[in-house]
Amino acid sequence: MNARKKHGTDMGFTKDETAFFRGFKSPHDIQIFLNEIPYDAEAGTSSPKVVIHERKANCFEGALFAAAVLRMLGNKPLIVDMIAHHDDDHVIAVFKHNECYGAIAKSNTTMLRFREPVYRSLRELVMSYFDFYINTVGEKTLRSYSNPVDLSKFDRQKWMTTEDSLDFIGDYLNEIRHKKILSTKQVRNLSRVDDEFVKLCFSGAAEDGVYKPEKN
């Protein structure tokens, strides 16, 4: 936690919104909040300010919200983009504690959410999601990830408080380099998971927000 802690009112939040942020004492508190609000299956990218008031979020919005709260707690507002094949991509907010990475995420599946800060490298953190990153036909779909993106680069666009769409951040993520995690041979040799595991991962998922590939 080496970034300077700022007051929410300095960032464009109201006093009530700033008081709301003060309720979060740890990264896991942020995860609990994201778990409790509904998954938003509609297209679009809203700011953390909008998430506070609408009490719903998709994966991308959840990562942006988590990054904003992490900033309030003294961390840099960092997100990592993960690219999948035959599946939805995933965005996580990342933080470090004792030189190890952890993550916070909103997900429509049960296994792609919080990670304790025990991973010694970013790749190690990303790979902790691999066996649980599956689609509805049991394919393991994670293929690549980005370096952490510091959202403070979008402060001029008021990414934390704007009422406008933040789709331009998604466009930026699509343009930056992603690191492959598998060789072509490894992809060919991947096994599918069994139906019981699929049911576990998608337990409680919002049906409208589930990517449904055709089973080969």
Image: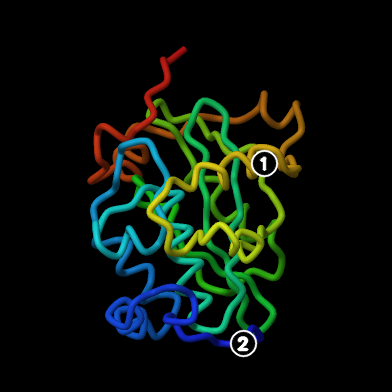
Residue to which mark 2 is pinned: 4
Nearer to us of marks 2 and 1 is 2
Residue at the limit of the structure toward the top, as seen here = 216
Residue pictured at 61% horizontal, 30% vertical: 190
- Tell me the tag on residue 19: none
Q: Nearer the viewer, residue 86 or 19?
A: 19
Disc 1, SS: strand
Residue pictured at 40% horizontal, 75% vertical: 28
**Label 2: how many Cα within 10 Å (few below 14, some 14–19, many 20+):** few
Disc 2, SS: loop
Residue to which mark 1 is pinned: 144
Q: Is residue 81 above or below residue 41?
A: below
**First-in-chain label (2 vs 1):** 2
User: The N terminus appears in which quarter of the rendering?
Assistant: bottom right
State how far apart marks 2 and 1 are (Cα): 31 Å
Q: Amino acid at mark 2?
A: Arg
